[in-house]
């Protein structure tokens, strides 16, 4: 009976001890990253890019090449005014990241089914 109680007690503390060991290992990695020496960034300059004119999307239609039957942007027209902060909001799958990707040239503009992206319109 006493052997069963002892085994039961030891079994009850193994899960917390295991969790503490994993936490200690994670903390070691975390503190190594925090305490790492900072990189020298003295020679790095800010980018020499400015949005001095509006960015305009006119009647843009876009589908990813892997899913050509699923149109992500359907006849989308937008104007991002220069010098203004603009938020793109909408539900998941509405095309927010696709718009950013097109503006950042993550995708070839030739992949557009139709429409124009004009970055220098007054």
Image: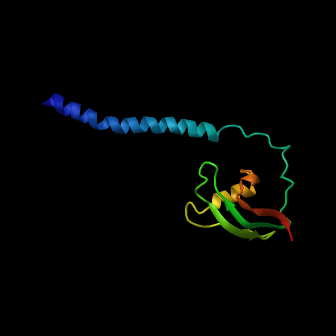
Q: Which of 73 and 120 is in front in this view?
A: 73
Query: Residue, x 50% and y 35% (percent of image)?
Result: 25
102 relative to 49 in the view: left or right: left
Q: Give percent across and percent down for residue 24.
A: 48, 36
68 relative to 103 in the view: left or right: left
Q: Give percent across and percent down for residue 113.
A: 70, 58
Query: Residue, x 72% and y 69% (percent of image)?
Result: 78
28 relative to 18 in the view: left or right: right
Q: Give percent across and percent down for residue 23.
A: 47, 39
Q: Is residue 87 visible in this depiction of the protein?
A: no
| Color theme of the render | rainbow
The quarter in which the C terminus is drawn is bottom right
Q: In this view, does 49 lie above or below 120?
A: above
Query: Residue, x 68% and y 67% (percent of image)?
Result: 76
Q: In this view, does 86 lie above or below 14?
A: below
Q: Is residue 99 visible in this depiction of the protein?
A: yes
Q: Give percent across and percent down for residue 109.
A: 75, 54
Query: Residue, x 57% and y 40% (percent of image)?
Result: 30
80 relative to 35 in the view: left or right: right
Q: Quadrant of residue 37?
A: top right
């Amino acid at each position: 009976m006493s052997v069963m109680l002892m085994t039961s007690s030891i079994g009850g503390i193994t899960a917390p001890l295991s969790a503490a060991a994993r936490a200690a290992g994670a903390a070691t990695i975390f503190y190594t990253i925090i305490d790492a020496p900072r990189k020298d960034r003295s020679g790095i300059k800010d980018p020499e890019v400015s949005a001095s004119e509006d960015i305009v999307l006119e009647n843009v239609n876009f589908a990813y090449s892997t899913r050509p039957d699923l149109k992500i942007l359907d006849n989308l027209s937008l104007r991002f005014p220069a010098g203004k902060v603009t938020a793109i909001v909408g539900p998941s799958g509405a095309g927010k990241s696709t718009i950013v990707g097109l503006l950042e040239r993550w995708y070839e503009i030739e992949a557009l089914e139709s429409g124009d992206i004009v970055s220098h319109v007054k």
